[in-house]
């Protein structure tokens, strides 16, 4: 499409996250950027996907972009509206969720997340919202995708508080615990930031997969608080298509509130 | 509302005003502020603006919750000022905090409602939450398949719910997001039901699947149109997202917060005056176009 503005870093993040959802069936959605990514995926790579909102909706068809996690637009036209006991018990802990989206103030190399406090718990420097459903999504969704902007403040050597477990201290410990304790999920699989896409290696440690157009390896490394693993085969994230950008700009976030 | 709060909410009580984003009884919260209740333990999955306002007004000594924020906007600043030592005003003390995850909070109400000693769930493994909340504990499965996490029952002194309609007996019907109103109501010692509309019992009985709480457990029924604003009531009025954003600005400043409480709570006698102060056209702007459900046929069996 001629005359289209180039993709912003937030748009690169949303498009990369949407593409990671290709073929997924049941996705537990958050508000903000995950919400746009999931709705973009439903219009492109995952038309069959069921959107689940923790407020108690299965199979949502939001006609506008929800500002809050409990926006009335997620109810009207949904497949099922259920109590939160049913949502967390039957749907999430019952093993019906393929992908859960999480974010956080801090993430470490094993994909463990902090959404509770910065500083000491009893006397915090910054009080954050806390778990909400994150702790149980991390344990029960079959796979976790993370969307967050990267910086040395957010990609840290050690968390101030572990709200939601990822690969704990490594893949072996994680797999053993998850099996022994009957967790439904296998933990984080993808982390999408404004600069790059990461996966997890066989040790359960985050490693670089692709770098977004316009970002550099130096920039990626200097905004992570540990030495990120960089395999030999890192390539550039495929650029967003004109249609993906049009969907974001004209249908999903026409006022530019999120992206 | 004045009578219901005076009769059923006392200083030192544990109060749950439930409703997940949807149907939050701000009218009850404001009346509690007006009646200057003190030392309340406020339980809610998501404290939302209603508890930020009640904390700002000095009603609370403790919060029990699972997600502490202004949904879709950011922080609850009045509560943050009472949780971060650096932000604490002279003479103020830190709020007591007891936090769970969403499933854990729901489970607390379920255990309370079922009169059980705990609710088992898989959450909390390898999370730091049990380290800072010793009420989250592990129990051995009696069936030999390892340990499971447990949360204790929560039995509020009073639960306050908001819904679309009820009859005079307090049989409450609701649609849209159901949150944990039913569980929180059944767990409580006393229940106040606030509704947009009082309907004849025949309306309730024409659609019994829609009833979430029976009059059996309801101590007071309050008719309070627009009583959930700035939250919303499915089909009646939309969430006032502009106000949720505006509160972010107001609540950052203690003086502006106090001025807002003065203008919109203390200086008004009741919810009807609050609605009148906004004006009818304001709420027309929040009214969604209609999207009625189909009608189901229960059959007439004699």
Image (cartoon, grey):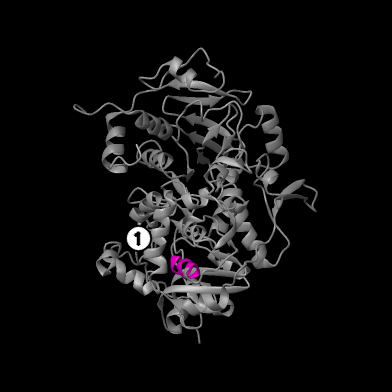
Quarter where residue A112 is shown: top right
Give the x, y percent position of residue A6: 27, 26
For label 1, the crowd category at 10 Å Cα-Cα, with few meaning under 14, some 14 to 19 and many 20 or more, is: many
The secondary element bearing badge 1 is classed as: loop
Give the x, y percent position of residue B112: 66, 65
A238 displayed left or right of A178? left
In the rendered image, residue B28 lying in the magenta stretch gets the answer: yes
Q: Nearer the viewer, residue A161 or B86?
A: B86
Magenta segment, prevailing SS (helix, strand or loop):
helix
Give the x, y percent position of residue A80: 46, 57
The extreme top residue here reads A232
> Up-down: is A166 above or below B170?
above
Q: Chain of mark 1?
A: B
Residue B233 visible to the viewer: no
**Numbered range of the magenta stretch:** B26-33
The extreme front residue here reads B90
The extreme bottom residue here reads B302
Q: Nearer the viewer, residue A134 or A184?
A: A134
> Up-down: is A227 above or below B89?
above
Residue under the image location 35 percent in, 47 percent down: A65
Q: How many marks?
A: 1
The residue pinned by badge 1 equals: B238
Quarter where residue A194 is shown: top left
Give the x, y percent position of residue B74: 44, 46
Q: Nearer the viewer, residue B152 or B171?
A: B152
In the rendered image, residue A131 lying in the magenta stretch gets the answer: no
Residue A7 visible to the viewer: yes
Residue under the image location 61 percent in, 52 percent down: B97
């Amino acid at each position: 499409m001629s005359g289209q503005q180039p993709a912003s870093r937030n748009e690169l993040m949303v498009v990369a996250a949407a593409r990671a959802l290709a073929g997924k069936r049941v996705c537990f959605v958050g508000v903000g950027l995950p919400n746009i990514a999931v709705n973009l995926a439903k219009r492109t790579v995952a038309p069959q996907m069921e959107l689940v909102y923790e407020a108690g909706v299965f199979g949502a068809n939001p006609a506008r972009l929800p500002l809050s996690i409990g926006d009335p637009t997620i109810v009207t036209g949904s497949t099922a509206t259920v109590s939160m006991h049913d949502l967390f018990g039957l749907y999430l802990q019952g093993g019906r969720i393929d992908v859960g989206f999480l974010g956080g103030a801090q993430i470490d190399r094993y994909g463990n997340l902090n959404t509770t406090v910065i500083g000491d718990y009893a006397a915090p420097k910054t009080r954050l919202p806390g778990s909400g459903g994150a702790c149980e999504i991390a344990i029960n969704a079959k796979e976790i995708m993370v969307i967050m902007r990267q910086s040395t403040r957010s990609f840290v050597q050690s968390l101030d508080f572990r709200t939601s477990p990822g690969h704990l201290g490594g893949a072996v410990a994680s797999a053993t615990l998850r099996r022994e304790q009957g967790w439904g999920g296998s933990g984080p699989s993808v982390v999408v930031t404004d600069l790059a896409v990461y996966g997890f290696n066989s040790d359960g440690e985050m490693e670089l997969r692709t770098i977004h157009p316009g970002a550099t390896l130096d920039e990626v490394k200097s905004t992570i608080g540990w030495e990120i693993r960089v395999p030999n085969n890192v390539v550039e994230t495929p650029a967003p298509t004109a249609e993906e950008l049009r969907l974001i700009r004209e249908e999903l976030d026409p006022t530019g509130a999120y992206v | 509302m004045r009578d219901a709060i005076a009769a059923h909410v006392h200083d030192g009580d544990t109060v749950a005003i439930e409703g997940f984003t949807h149907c939050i009884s701000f009218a009850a919260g404001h009346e509690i502020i007006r009646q200057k209740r003190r030392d309340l333990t406020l339980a809610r999955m998501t404290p939302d603006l209603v508890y930020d306002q009640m904390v700002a007004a000095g009603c609370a000594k403790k919060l029990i919750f699972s997600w502490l924020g202004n949904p879709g906007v950011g922080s609850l600043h009045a509560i943050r000022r009472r949780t971060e030592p650096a932000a604490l005003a002279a003479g103020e003390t830190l709020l007591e905090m007891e936090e769970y995850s969403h499933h854990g909070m729901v489970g607390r109400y379920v255990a309370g409602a079922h009169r059980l000693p705990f609710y088992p769930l898989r959450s909390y493994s390898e999370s730091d939450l049990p380290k800072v909340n010793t009420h989250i504990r592990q129990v051995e499965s009696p069936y030999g398949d390892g340990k499971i996490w447990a949360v204790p029952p929560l039995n509020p002194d009073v639960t306050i719910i908001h819904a679309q309609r009820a009859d005079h007996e307090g049989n409450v019907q609701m649609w849209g997001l159901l949150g944990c109103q039913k569980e929180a109501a059944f767990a409580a010692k006393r229940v106040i039901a606030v509704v947009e509309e009082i309907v004849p019992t025949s309306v309730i009985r024409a659609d019994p699947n829609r009833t979430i709480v029976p009059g059996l457990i309801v101590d007071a029924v309050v008719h309070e149109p627009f009583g959930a604003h700035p939250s919303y009531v499915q089909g009646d009025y939309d969430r006032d997202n502009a106000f949720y954003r505006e509160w972010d600005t107001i609540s950052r400043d203690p003086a502006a917060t106090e001025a807002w409480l003065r203008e919109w709570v203390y200086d008004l006698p009741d919810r009807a005056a609050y609605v009148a102060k906004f004006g009818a056209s304001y709420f027309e702007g929040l009214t969604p176009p209609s999207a009625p459900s189909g009608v189901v046929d229960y059959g007439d069996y004699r």
